[in-house]
Each structure stands twice: as structure tokens, then as C-alpha cells.
Image (cartoon, rainbow, N blue to C red):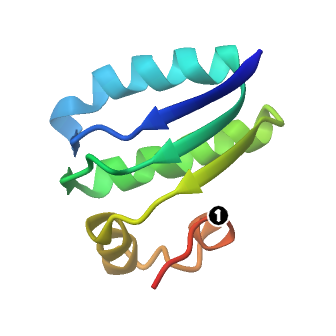
Amino acid sequence: MEKQEFELPNDLTISHLSAFKSNITELIENSEHITFTDKSLNKIDTVGVQILLVVMNELITQKKTFTWQISSEILQQSIKQLGLENSDFKLYLQIN
């Protein structure tokens, strides 16, 4: 088990979810610590935000450590629009 960095994809919407799911599942299984970044993220929908919450909860359940290096305005806006700024995201992300 090792530390890994995971770059969120350019498009994290329902139409691109299956590729993301298989990549993240393997990463969670094979990593002790994951650092998430969002340098490439340009598009996210409700399902994309929800899957990030699922990933976060799975990491917590499996007692894995993780860091979010999230600066994407689009992700922060999506979290706010969905009313999730006080969810688990608040504990791990700096929501402006």
C-alpha cells in the first residue's frame, strides 16, 4: 500500500462515470493515502458531486487517509448549488 495522487477527470458527469468508477475503485483498493486534485476538472454534474461524496465515505469506512487539493470554482459552485456545503465536504474541503 502506498500514497497516490489522483487527478479528477476533465468531465465528471453521468456519461463518464463508469470509467471514473473503475479507476477510483482500483485506486482505493491499492492505496493507503490518496491526494485528490482538480486541476483538469471543467465539468461536473449532480451525479459527479454525489460520487465524490460516495468516494469520501468509502475512504472513511476503509480507514484510508486522503487529502483534497481542490481549487476548482466549478466544483465549489456545484457543491453550493446542491446545498452540500455543510455535508462531509465541509470537513475536507475549503468551500469559499
Relative to the observer, which residue lies in front, 73 or 51?
73
Instruction: Categorize mark 1 by other alpha carbons within 10 Å: few (<14), some (14-19), many (20+).
Output: some
- Quadrant where the C terminus lies? bottom left
The residue at 48%/73% (across/down) is 84
Residue 22 falls left or right of residue 13: right
Q: Secondary structure at mark 1?
A: helix
* Image vertical order of residue 29 relative to residue 15, above or below: above
Q: How many marks?
A: 1
Residue 24 placement (x, y as % from top left): 49, 26
Residue 43 falls left or right of residue 80: left
Residue beneath label 1, please?
Answer: 92
The residue at 30%/72% (across/down) is 73
Relative to the observer, which residue lies in front, 87 or 93?
93
In the rendered image, the residue lying farthest to the bottom is 96
- Quadrant where the N terminus lies? top right
Relative to the observer, which residue lies in front, 88 or 30?
30
Residue 30 placement (x, y as % from top left): 67, 14
Residue 15 placement (x, y as % from top left): 16, 33
The residue at 57%/67% (across/down) is 93
The residue at 37%/41% (across/down) is 8
* Image vertical order of residue 81 relative to residue 12, above or below: below
* Image vertical order of residue 62 relative to residue 19, above or below: below
Residue 16 placement (x, y as % from top left): 21, 31
Q: Amino acid at mark 1?
A: Tyr
* Image vertical order of residue 43 relative to residue 20, above or below: below
